[in-house]
Amino acid sequence: MRAINDNAELYATVRLILGALQDAGEHESSAAIDRALSFSSLPGEVLGEVRAQLLRARDLPALRTDEPRRLTEVSLAYLDRVLGPALD
């Protein structure tokens, strides 16, 4: 998958990740990421919360398969470009 270039592409990609989590029965993680998409009216806060939830969920088995892993990686790469690197 190519790099994400804007927030609309990020949103569409995160929706695909949510689908993979739902299909795998990871409803709690899916709901947490879904809530992050509407966390605030401030875009920076939404992006930061989405990144935090993706970082929490990325090691789940549902996101370790090829396509969900790629989707998660490109999403996190975009978020790092926009927000700066995540702090540990």
Image: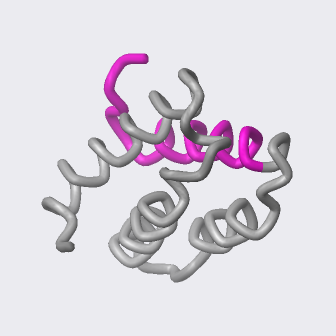
Seen from the viewer's position, the closer of residues 62 and 68 is: 62
Q: Quadrant of residue 15?
A: top right
Total numbered labels placed on residues in the image: 0
Answer left or right for 1 relative to 20: left
- On screen, residue 26 versus residue 62, left or right, reads right
The residue sitting at the left extreme is 84
Indicate the colouring scheme.
Answer: one colour
The answer to whether 72 is drawn above or below residue 50 in the figure is above
Question: How far across and down, in percent of the image, does residue 2 sit?
Answer: 36, 18
Residue at the image position 85 percent from the left and 52 percent from the top = 25
Residue drawn at 73 percent across, 39 percent down: 20
Of residues 61 and 46, the one drawn nearer to the viewer in this rendering: 61
Query: Residue furthest toward the top?
Result: 1
| Quadrant where the image shows the N terminus | top left
- Please provide percent x and percent y for residue 23: 84, 41
Quarter location, residue 77: top left
Per the image, is 69 magenta?
no
Relative height, residue 28 to residue 64 (above, below): below
Residue visible at 70% across and 48% down?
A: 18
Q: Dominant secondary structure of the magenta stretch?
A: helix
Tell me the magenta residue range. Answer: 1-21
Viewport quadrant of the C terminus: bottom left
- Residue 2 in magenta? yes
Instruction: Answer above or below: position of 24 versus 74.
Output: below
**How far across and how far down the image is residue 31, in percent?**
74, 68
In percent of the image, x 45 and y 28: which residue is there? 70
